[in-house]
Image (tube, rainbow, N blue to C red):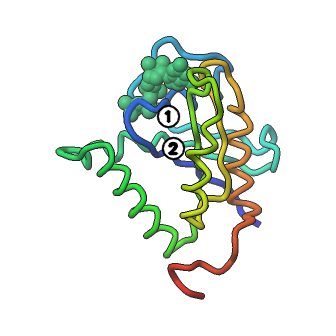
Amino acid sequence: MRKDVRILLVGEPKVGKTSLIMSLVSEEFPKVVPYRAEEITIPADVTPEKVPTHIVDYSGTLRPFRLGLKCIELFRCHVLLNKMLCMWFRVPLILVGNKSDLVEHSSMETILPIMNRYSEIETCVECSAKNLKNISELFYYAQKAVLHPTGPLYCPERRD
Ligand code: GTP
Ligand code: MG
């Protein structure tokens, strides 16, 4: 039985990582967002799985990494980093499509090929920090992915 869950938000600049955390905490879209949210801990009794959950805005940690890197290169770094983590710890990944309020149709067509390519992606979710669509669900899916992974125990990178 795990004693806690740690959720890191990783992504390209301005995709809304900090806004997602703030929308979850205050249940409203923040007009002004700091560059990085403080780490928050959700107590066990208010989480669906009854496990204390830490939420970390990872962007700031990676920022020095960005010097001279274009978005696509940064994304590749994230993928590489995640692959390394997957090999060592089998970290589950949730693919998030934020700002769904700005698009008229679903971005699933873009998301599904990415999901099929990376076995460590447990699930994907479209959400909006602005109209609070799927915000609590997103963090619940992340918690669930750690506690009850549905992916294969076999990790292709490790071949075991
Ligand atoms: P960095 O930390 O600078 O990488 O950015 P971030 O990923 O933390 O994004 P941030 O939360 O600062 O949001 C960037 C901009 O997108 C802000 O102007 C937000 O108001 C806006 N934004 C965030 N989420 C949404 C959303 O769901 N819908 C819309 N329309 N705008 C959003
Ligand atoms: Mg931020």
Q: Residue at x 67, y 53 (%)?
A: 123
**Residue 151 horizontal/vertical position (percent):** 70, 68
Q: Is residue 36 visible to us here? A: no
For badge 2, the amino acid type reads: Leu
Instruction: Identify the residue at horizontal 68%, vertical 77% (top origin).
Output: 153
Residues tagged 2 and 1 counted as in contact (Cβ below 8 A): yes
Q: Quadrant of residue 146?
A: bottom right
Where residue 49 appears, x then y in whole percent?
Answer: 81, 50
Mark 2 vs ligand 1: CB below 8 Å:
yes
- SS for dot 2: strand
Residue 18 image offset from top left, x and y in percent: 49, 30
131 to the left or right of 148: left
Depicted 142 relative to depicted 16: above or below: below
Q: Is residue 25 above or below residue 64?
A: above
- Look at the numbered disc 1 and say if its residue's Cβ is closer than 8 Å to ligand 1: yes
**Who's the residue at 46% across and 62% down the image?**
82
- Name the residue carrying label 1: 17
Which comes before the other along the chain, label 2 or label 1? 2
